[in-house]
Image (tube, rainbow, N blue to C red):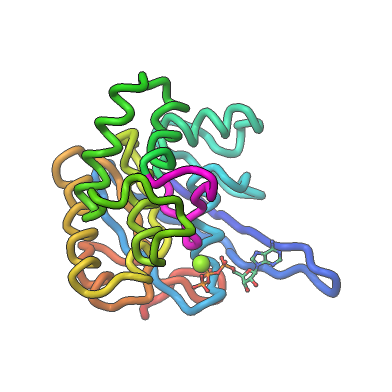
Amino acid sequence: MEVRNLSHRYETSDRPLVVLDGLSFSIPPGGYVALTGASGAGKSTLLSILGGLEPPQSGHVHVGGHDLHALGGDELAAYRRSTVGFVFQHFGLLDTLTASENVEVALALAGARAGARRRRARELLAAVGLADRAAHRPGALSGGERQRVAIARALANRSRLVLADEPTGNLDERAATQVLDLLEQLPAERGCTFVVVTHDRTVAGRAPSRLHLAEGRFSTP
Ligand SMILES: Nc1ncnc2c1ncn2[C@@H]1O[C@H](COP(=O)(O)OP(=O)(O)OP(=O)(O)O)[C@@H](O)[C@H]1O
Ligand SMILES: [Mg+2]
């Protein structure tokens, strides 16, 4: 991942809000980075740009050979499907689907067959400690359980880039440790690049490198 001079502003009714102000950084394949910063600092905004959810407004954003600036809507969708596993801050689960089906949707979009999808979903839900909740819909799961379904879904396709926005924000210490152990296997075993946004010092402390966002730039915390 190679980012040069990335800026992002939101147009609001009074004046434009500059959230990212000329960021430059790179993360090697297999890199594991914790992204910290105050609430409102722009962490989720940066993650959405890296994950192809929000097109970059300026600068140069290259991820795994894709120039995100040059991709149109359909190509960005293909980039998200092929390259990115995203754990949303607010989970983004589909309310009418069970936990298992929420994980399976990601696999279906990538072309996996029904039997393989069910097996993989079962394996991932077990890995996040939810083997016995596979048939629950999000409304019948606790906040931390929903969060773990979102993590299972992000891991479903063995994406080369996993972006996790506060993946342990709703978890107790034991569940958080279990989830981090799982997420940390990605860079270690598969050479996957992993960026985790967190307000939790313990979580940030586990990452070998850290970026701290303040006033649109990286600084020392
Ligand atoms: N669509 C939008 N339009 C206008 N302003 C926005 C929009 N989305 C986010 N913002 C503003 O941009 C800033 C950065 O938002 P962002 O969600 O990236 O912060 P964050 O660092 O993820 O915060 P938190 O830790 O609370 O999740 C915030 O001040 C927010 O109010
Ligand atoms: Mg956020």
User: Along the line of sight, which residue is nearer the eye, 46 or 6?
Assistant: 46
136 vs 116: above or below: below
Residue 34 image point, x, y percent: 32, 64
Query: In this rendering, is residue 169 above or below 159?
Result: below
Q: How many numbered circles are shown?
A: 0
- Comparing 129 with 163, the one in front is 129
Viewer-nearest residue: 123 or 16:
123
Q: Which residues are magenta?
A: 86-99
Q: Quadrant of the C terminus?
A: bottom left
Q: Could you tell me residue 120's position as x and y percent?
A: 26, 33
Asked if residue 89 lies left or right of residue 180, the reply is: right
In the rendered image, the residue lying farthest to the right is: 13
Identify the residue at image location x=24%, y=53%.
128
Pinpoint residue 214: horizontal percent, then vertical percent. Answer: 50, 76
Residue drawn at the location 28% of the way across and 70% of the way down: 204
Residue found 21% across the figure and 47% down from its top:
126
Q: Is residue 71 above or below residue 197?
A: above
